[in-house]
Amino acid sequence: MKILIIEDESINANRLKRLLEELEPNCEILDVIDTVQGSVKWLNSNDMPDLITMDIRLADGISFSIFEEVKITCPIIFTTAYDEYAVRAFKVNSIDYLMKPIEKTELEQALTKFKSVSKVQNNTEDIAVILKGFMNKPSFRLRFLVTFRDGYKSVDVADIDFVYSEFKTSHLFLQNGTTIPIPQTMEELEEELDPDVFFRANRQFFIRAESIKSIANYFNAKLKIQLKADPEREVIISREKAPFFKQWMDR
């Protein structure tokens, strides 16, 4: 199996390469490309690989631009740290996606799917569908309708400071200090909240940049976040997620 990795973060590329070699000892990693233009040049100069793993956001732009210049005829596994809601709409035929940080079991499932289908010879229509879906930015939740006294009230997403889960219940922590329980799970919120605004720090928290008071290094390459509105609440970001959090903040 000949695989091309298109990924602009060396940490992610190395992890992906290691996992691929663990799962497929006989695979050949042809190259690791970190830009759109580098990918176009490589694909125009080499035989088509059996499989491509492709990050969506590269150093010089969005990887879907590659399809405008190169006809790709092999299956692709898309990888992304953001836009998870949008990426689910891109899943067409032989194309799969993985959310970063990439888990070994999920990669194994994607490879199993790859093996179950024959090599795609002409997927022009699939790529057109992907490009169209990507250009249409997904709609994210604007407000929550919550119970209030004998009725209901609307809470704007813009008024949320952070979201946390406690005792299997999700809560909105508003900028005025009010806490409101909601029926949505954290997994449902991951699809409904705009990932450009809210970062899922861990299983218990969604935070936004404006809610952060300080960011400190923690043991084992983790990060410790202190919140402005609730400085006593501890928010830990794992070593695996730390690079994506830094990238999310540094925009």
Image: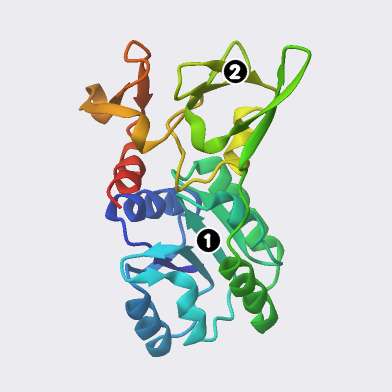
Residue drawn 54% across the image and 16% down it: 179
Q: Is residue 241 visible to us here?
A: no
Measured as percent of width and height from the top left, residue 66 is found at: 46, 79
Q: Is residue 108 visible to us here?
A: yes
Residue 212, above or below 106: above
Residue 180: numbered disc: 2
Label 2 – label 1 distance at C-alpha: 36 Å
Measured as percent of width and height from the top left, residue 4 is found at: 43, 69
Identify which residue, 121 or 239, lies in the foreground: 239
Callout 1 amino acid: Phe
Q: How many numbered badges does the structure rendering display?
A: 2
Residue drawn 25% across the image and 30% down it: 221
Residue drawn 52% across the image and 53% down it: 83
Residue 78: numbered disc: 1
Measured as percent of width and height from the top left, residue 222 is found at: 29, 28
Helix, strand or loop under label 2: strand
Q: Quadrant of residue 43?
A: bottom left
Q: Nearer the viewer, mark 2 or mark 1?
A: 2
